[in-house]
Image (cartoon, rainbow, N blue to C red):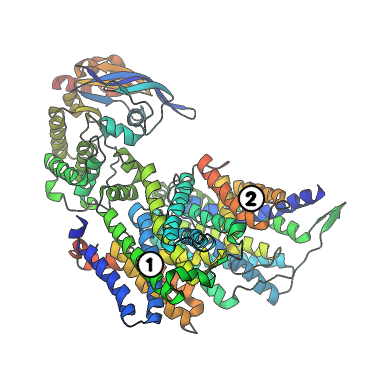
Amino acid sequence: MSGILASMIDGVLIGAVYGLAAMGLSLIWGVMDVINLTHGAVIALGMFGMYILFAAFPINAYFLLLPVIAAGLLLGLIIYWTSVHWVINRPQLASLLSTFAVNMIIIGIGTAIWSTSPYNVNFTLRGITIGAYTFTGNHMAAASAAVVIALALEVFLYRTRPGKAIRAVADNREAAELMGISSTMVLALAFAIGIALAAASGALVSTLFPFTILSGAGYQMKSFVVTVLAGLGKPFGALVAGVLLGLLEGAVTPFIAVSWIPMIEFGLFVVVLVAFPRGIFGRATA
Amino acid sequence: MSALLEVNGVTKRFGGLVAVSDVTFTLAEGDILGLIGPNGAGKTTLFNMVNGVYKLNAGKISFAGQDITDRPPNEVVHFGIARTHQIVKPLYGMTVLENVTVGACFGRDYLKLKPARKVALEVLERVGLADRADTSARSLTIAGKKRLEVARALAARPKLLLLDEVLAGLNPTEVELMIGIVRNIRDSGISVLMIEHLMQAIMSLSDRIVVLNLGSKLAEGRPEEVVKNPDVVEAYLGFPDIVDKLRGVQ
Amino acid sequence: MIFRRPVFWLILIFAALMAFIPLHGNNVSMREDLILVAVAVILASNLNLMIGYTGYVNFGHIVFYGLGGYVGLYLATVKGWNLILSALLAGLAVSFCALLFGLGILRLRGAYFALATIGILVAVQSFVSNFDPWGRSTGLYVPFDAYQPLGGARRALWITYFLVIAVMALSMILSLAIKISKFGLGLFAIREDEDAAVVLGVNATVYKAIIYSVSAFLPAVAGALMFYKNGMIDPSIAFEFMLSLEGIVMLMLGGKGTVVGAALGGGLYEKLRSYLLTSPKLSNFHLVIAGGMLLLVVLFAPGGLIGWLYRLVPRSEKVIE
């Protein structure tokens, strides 16, 4: 019994990170109706970003999150201007394929540099032991970081002008333009933030598990599941849905072989899409 | 004249909003029935209920004696009802002829490709788009797209045609042409249920009028009667000089 | 009818050339090259039915190929059935599976559907990796004597080659036949505007289920033949996501929505790919180059090479379909 509880608590903590990843996906999806298929690749880049930074600066890895986020913003702008901007007014298929193509490019370059070998970020924070449970320090730090970033995003979206501009464009791009908001700048910014969030989540995951250049794909699937669970456009909804997914995983992993998990997540994805097209919390999906 | 379309006590809710509330009316065969009302009155919602896009929360709809309540749109076409949309939906990647052929292939008679193409060409002649048959639907003007929308619906060889604001966005010349097309349609034996805002047009075209307001039926009758109805005047027609003008038309 | 179309005869000539040129010189290495081209064309052509004709992007298309490989190889070796029968049955079985998958995911639109197809691929791979009768993660292999009924391994290789060429020709003819049919017109209407198509009387639910199922058949047959010929199958080579992606790149490159485009894209890409994989410097960049090509095509030439041809020479659209 205690094994399951520990597993579930771990799951909740990791779930916060899933939520963070999903926020990036959900933001882009909600604001510009683009399904960002570079998401997984960027998560992987976030993992390697942390690895490189940590190798260069062996300080508390969680402080290195900031440069990762900054790099993520820059990367996001680059991806936006090379592949998203030109197809934003075309049917969704075009952006699906263009982001997919960029994904292939990133993974290709990544494989060339790092091959498919596993890597590790060897940083451990001390955990807390209460009775029979040990809460690993890394898990707690990662979850905390995720929550802090989510809060920051919420504040940004609801209390700052650029944030409000993003929400306006998400609501009705034409109307926002008529109000004098440069939708291109806003879209680029929203995209960049979405990418930065993905990169940050990857960086956090790298402190928890070993990873390869291909690890991003699994987290991408989880992000999609969380996003459809939460519905679009509510960052905090994504965080909560992520925690729920983590909880579910935690409850299930002691009993089922790990290789079944992708199947279960996929099943969940389809069921939620079919049964709750609007997600559990959010507004109508695209 | 027998009742072709019978709409009985139909209601449609979207969450807390009641878009259409207990509306009842009939359309006699061979008639042009005009459906008017302020914006948001529920007219397009009613169309969507008739042709199966929305499921009803209450009520029944029958067509030519058969119950068509809650049937999916592709089945409703086979019963003999075709519709146009307020915001036209051309199949952009296809030519004008192909667009109309789709209507003929999947319409009431479910024709094979070759005969469908023939029907499509005939229909294009009737609406005056025959010379644009092989051009892409993208290249049409708004008036052309509206005529394409009508042609596609006609190609299905319906007994009842639902026209949703088919005159919107047209200049006066184009409006005249389209009115001519609608009359032509009725003369060929097809009944018409049309939503319109252009008062003079719909008053002169319609045999009967149904007025909706805030989801409920406000009035029903011949155009001259409806125009004199004080509730209608208050809710919709508004200005006395328009009313006078319309009376002048009758 | 279909025989009046020039493309029909082009397909037959193309297939005949592919079949007889290597045979004439007993050129085994050319045959091995060309069989990969044929598979590429098969995958791209059938993918075209979903992406190009119906407008539904199938990212997990390779699942049909892999599943067909498993069913076919299992029937031909473990059960000892005739190869052609096994391959056909594999096709039917996988088509039926597609129908079942379709029940679940075809009600999803656009990108949701695309994502769900990845999920199907992952789920099937996951399932097969745990499925005992199919060897779990080790997979199945073809014992050498299984080739005896075909007259030995050498003859078997030629026979499977001709069968794959036949499947390729069938794929292209199927594409053409659908394109000029009423069914095809309905699919195009769904692609352009599914809601409008339904209002016009197209039974989109049934049509989508049919085309999804049909698009699974020939790839499954091809999978059965290919894995049998290669002598083994396991979950990682059967359900290689990369192959699914390449199918998409090939189709977009050649020109989605056209019959010839799938073949052109398949052939060109396959040539490029074999060059890349053997070149010592570039083999790592296979994925990068494929991605780069896809990006360029999507941004600047969404109609692919054939689309570009149509723009240059509008009249070619009537002949080269």
* Residue drawn at x 37%, y 56% as measured from the top left: C51
Location of the N terminus of chain B (image quadrant): top left
Q: Classify residue C221 by image quadrant.
A: bottom left
Q: Nearer the viewer, residue C220 or B61?
A: C220
Which residue in the structure is indicated by mark 2?
A: A242
Q: Residue furthest bottom?
A: C280
Residue C55: tell me if it is visible: yes
Q: Position of residue B208 (x, y in %)?
A: 22, 20
| Amino acid type of the residue tagged 2 in the rendering | Gly
Q: Position of residue A150 (x, y in %)?
A: 63, 53
* Residue drawn at x 60%, y 73% as measured from the top left: A116
* Residue drawn at x 49%, y 28% as measured from the top left: B16
As helix, strand or loop, the secondary structure at mark 2 comes to helix
Q: Position of residue B46 (x, y in %)?
A: 34, 28
Viewed as shown, does residue B49 lie left or right of C86?
left
As helix, strand or loop, the secondary structure at mark 1 comes to helix
**Tag 1 and tag 2 share a subunit:** no
